[in-house]
Amino acid sequence: MPVFEYQCEKCGHVTSFLEKAGSRKAHVCEKCGSGKTEKVFSTFAAKSGSSGSSSCPTGTCPFS
Ligand SMILES: [Zn+2]
């Protein structure tokens, strides 16, 4: 099962979550309890995404 990291917008703490791909459950900061978290792309995800050509629809993807 992959690990996803979410950074809290409130305190900046990064919490790791074990979950299935496509899961839509809430990601709550383990430090302050805030539900406002943003997904952090790991270097592993960035590398796997760079194997293909640029597929970012907006052209603003930092990994494209
Ligand atoms: Zn927090």
Image (spheres, rainbow, N blue to C red):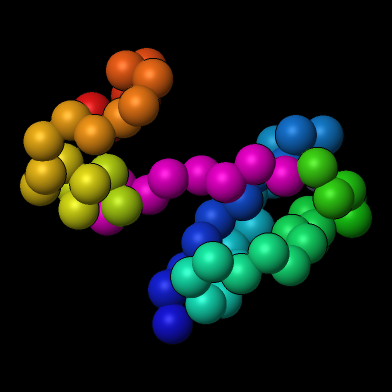
Q: Is residue 38 magenta?
A: yes
| Residue at x-position 74% and y-position 67% | 25
Q: Is residue 48 above or below residue 12?
A: below
Q: Is residue 7 above or below residue 58?
A: below
| Residue at x-position 78% and y-position 55% | 29
Image location of residue 19, percent across then percent down: 56, 76
Is 31 left, or right, of 37 in this rendering?
A: right
The span shown in magenta is 37-44
Q: Quadrant of residue 36?
A: top right
Q: Is residue 11 visible?
A: no
Could you say which is closer to the camera, residue 11 or residue 21?
21
Residue at the bottom extreme, as displayed: 1
Image location of residue 2, percent across then percent down: 42, 73
Image location of residue 1, percent across then percent down: 44, 82
| Residue at x-position 70% and y-position 37% | 12
Residue at the front extreme, as displayed: 57
Q: Is residue 50 above or below residue 3?
A: above
Could you say which is closer to the camera, residue 46 or residue 58?
58
Point out the image quarter for the C terminus: top left
Image location of residue 8, percent across then percent down: 73, 42
Q: Is residue 29 magenta?
A: no
Ligand 1: image quarter: top right
| Residue at x-position 23% and y-position 46% | 49
